Image (spheres, coloured by chain):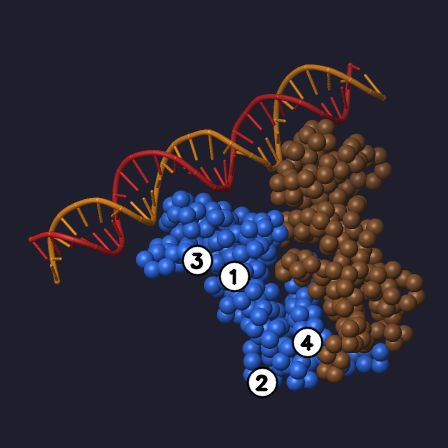
Chain colours: A brown, B blue, C orange, D red
DNA sequence: ATGTCAAAACTGAACGTTACGTTTCGGTAG
DNA sequence: CTACCGAAACGTAACGTTCAGTTTTGACAT
């Protein structure tokens, strides 16, 4: 029903997403309006609303296309420790880049008061990544390479703290933090040997 | 400097915070407006803006008075494992209660696009709690009761995942989840013995 | 203690502004 | 000719401020 073949997407999808992304970099997420996106993209407002029901929906696609898909997937080189480290470092890089940070924080903030948007965010961005990640973690656990616990919990021990820093505490998510986090969850001693006797 | 003795606060602070809290429960955070708060509290709009610069600022005080202070402090009974469990269970209870959830999620969402509000949130709510918690964790580590790692990281391993569930994944934060989380961070085996073989 | 008074702060209404989401109109391309 | 699209205009809603007119407050005089 929704649409299958002959449906043509918005003619200037790229221009619109680029305009939104640029405006967010220039003004910050909150100050971007649908009107401004339309003007910048040389598109009529009705066209914009035809394909995206809200500003949040536009930025959902911006984030999906330009941010998440290239950057946030648990790799699989066979060495789980290395892969987890690379994965969490990916979050760190994303959460540190000012532009990506603006986009993510603004979008997540909007999703907190827009259930529609939150649902789309989970379905279109989160869920597709989740399945693969958890399978990979469970396999490594079965091979005895990771601590035995609910794979979901293990995943959240790794990505929860960076998200917490991004959305709650505002502390920076550095590469060093990412590495310390992975080491802690893998049960390794702190890299600098501090408190080794505990 | 700000004011010392004869400064009188808003005459009907209680009525205003109560009105905001009630409206949030009835309509959801996003649908609450400053106008509606003023009407409900039988207060003029100028008075409202006189004491709170924005809707977010009002809800910051709501959350601080009614939610956070009574519920989110790491207790100190001498048994650190028990205390951590009670602490994280407190988060679970808060994140599960629909009213508290509305308030917290709405406020945090607004803080993502309002730097002023985010700063107040950290200063007035987060920072006061943080210091005590970290001291308590560090002391327990010194006594060998907790794994040796940066106390900040240990704290974030415990509260990061619940916040992640609240603000990102939307998964429920149950008491069982809280307990499993504490057990995992303390290095205990899963309570139900599942996956015990690794 | 009680009555009086000026200053402060309040309520309620109205205002201009801004962005929303929709509708209408005129031009263009197939 | 027809269908679509950009531009402009529209009504709605909430913003944050301004303006009377009224009530509360604390000080002082009786």
Disc 4 to disc 3: CB gap under 8 Å: no
Q: Chain of mark 1?
A: B
Q: Residue at x 80, y 57 (%)?
A: A90
Q: Are marks 4 and 1 on the same chain?
A: yes
Residue B129 point in image, percent of width and height: 55, 69
- Quick one: label 1 or label 2, which is nearer the N terminus? 2
Percent position of residue B87, x then y? 60, 74
Residue B44 occupies which quadrant of the picture? top left
First reached walking from the N terminus: tag 4 or tag 1 = 1
Q: Separation of disc 3 and disc 1 at Cα?
A: 19 Å
Q: Residues within 10 Å of mark 2 (few under 14, many from 20)?
A: few
Q: Name the residue nearer the viewer: B56 or B150.
A: B150
Marks 4 and 1, Cα distance to the nearest angstrom? 27 Å
**Distance Cα–Cα, label 2 vs label 3:** 37 Å
Percent from the top left, x then y, of residue B131? 57, 70
Q: Is residue B35 above or below residue A72?
A: above
Q: Which label lies toward us, 4 or 1?
A: 1
Residue A88 location, quadrant: bottom right
Report helix, strand or loop for mark 1.
helix
């Amino acid at each position: 029903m929704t649409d299958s073949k002959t449906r043509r997407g918005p003619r200037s999808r790229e221009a619109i997403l680029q305009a939104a992304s640029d405006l967010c970099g220039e003004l910050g997420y909150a100050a971007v309006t649908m009107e401004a996106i339309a003007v910048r993209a040389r598109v009529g407002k009705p066209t914009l609303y035809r394909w995206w029901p809200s500003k949040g929906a536009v930025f959902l696609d911006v984030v999906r296309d330009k941010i998440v898909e290239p950057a946030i997937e648990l790799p699989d080189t066979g060495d789980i420790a290395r892969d987890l480290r690379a994965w969490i470092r990916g979050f760190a890089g994303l959460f540190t880049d000012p532009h990506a940070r603006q986009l993510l924080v603004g979008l997540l903030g909007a999703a907190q008061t827009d259930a529609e948007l939150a649902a789309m965010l989970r379905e279109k961005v989160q869920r597709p990544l989740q399945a693969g990640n958890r399978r990979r973690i469970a396999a490594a656990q079965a091979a005895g390479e990771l601590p035995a616990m609910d794979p979901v919990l293990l995943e959240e021990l790794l990505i929860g703290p960076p998200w917490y820093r991004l959305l709650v505490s505002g502390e920076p998510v550095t590469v060093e933090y990412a590495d310390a986090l992975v080491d802690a969850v893998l049960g390794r001693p702190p890299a600098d040997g501090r408190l080794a006797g505990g």
